Image (cartoon, helix red, strand yellow):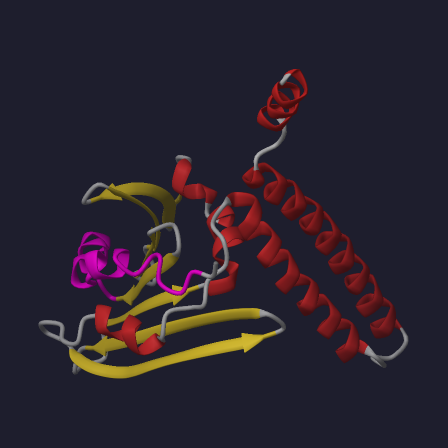
Amino acid sequence: MSVLCAAALLAACGPSPEQVAREAAIKQLEQAAKDMEAAGKRAEAATAKGGQDVGAAMGDAMKALGAMAGAAGGVVGGGSYDPVDFRKLKEVLPQELAGFTKGDSSGEKNNAFGISVSEAKQSFRTDDGNKSVRFEITDPGSLAGPFALANMWMNVDIDKETSDGYEKTSTVSGRKLMEKWNKSSKHGEVHLVVGNRFMVQVDSRGLDMNDVKALLGKVDIAKLEAMKADGKKS
């Protein structure tokens, strides 16, 4: 009985399956980083020799990036995802905009070196061409984990200003976003991460910044939020 109790106590004190998986992911991430650094050095050396074998070295670097993406997803607990079909992403974008004519609509899914990404775009323009708007949604798919880490600006405050514009974080409808404005060109853009996965971007020319931020309301954020777990791999 005492032996069984001791064994049970040791099992209870041991690392959980989640901890073991996390530690394994960290080791994979470290190795992927080393592989990527080595591939980068090989690409530099190949370039210095006249470009021979650069393609192979870049291919190795992309494979390392794909491995890093999967490992980073394990570290942050985000897992790995197959990106949402761009046709579903297009359904979230506005199909009409008052005062504007509907322009180009596009979508695509790319899968290379273990990295899968999908995106959808919809543009609008006034008849005189003085104002334009482009809506874009990107699903980083297998890069979802490191993508979340890369967008740490969502958790910090940024406030930069020059005589010709600014860049800062702000809050619209309870969501934190990044906004950029150039006064001379009247170029404004806002970026919002939804569900810690999707990047929503509104890019415009000829509009006031308040109008640009208001355009986020034309995107069906709730529908996009509902997709945040779609395609998650076990």
Closer to the camera, 128 or 63? 63
Give the farthest residue toward the left: 98
In-image side of 100 versus 182 (left or right): left
Closer to the camera, 1 or 119? 1
- Residue range in magenta is 206-232
Q: Where is residue 167 in the image (x, y as percent from the top left)?
A: 39, 46
Is residue 160 at all visible to an observer of this figure? no
Residue at 34% across / 82% down in the picture? 106
Q: Position of residue 61 (x, y in %)?
A: 72, 66
Please tell me whether residue 62 is drawn above or below residue 144 in the rendered image: below
Give the farthest residue toward the right: 49
Query: Picture quarter containing residue 214?
Result: bottom left
Residue at 67% across / 68% down in the picture? 62
Q: Where is residue 169 in the image (x, y as percent from the top left)?
A: 35, 42
Q: Position of residue 173 (x, y in %)?
A: 18, 45
Is residue 72 at all visible to an observer of this figure? yes
Residue at 70% across / 63% down in the picture? 64
Closer to the camera, 58 or 87? 87
Query: Picture quarter containing residue 139?
Result: bottom left
Determine if the magenta segment contains residue 110.
Answer: no
Determine if the magenta segment contains residue 218.
Answer: yes
Closer to the camera, 177 or 232? 232
In-image side of 7 versus 150 (left or right): right
Residue at 13% across / 75% down in the picture? 96
Please tell me whether residue 167 is drawn above or below residue 9 in the rendered image: below
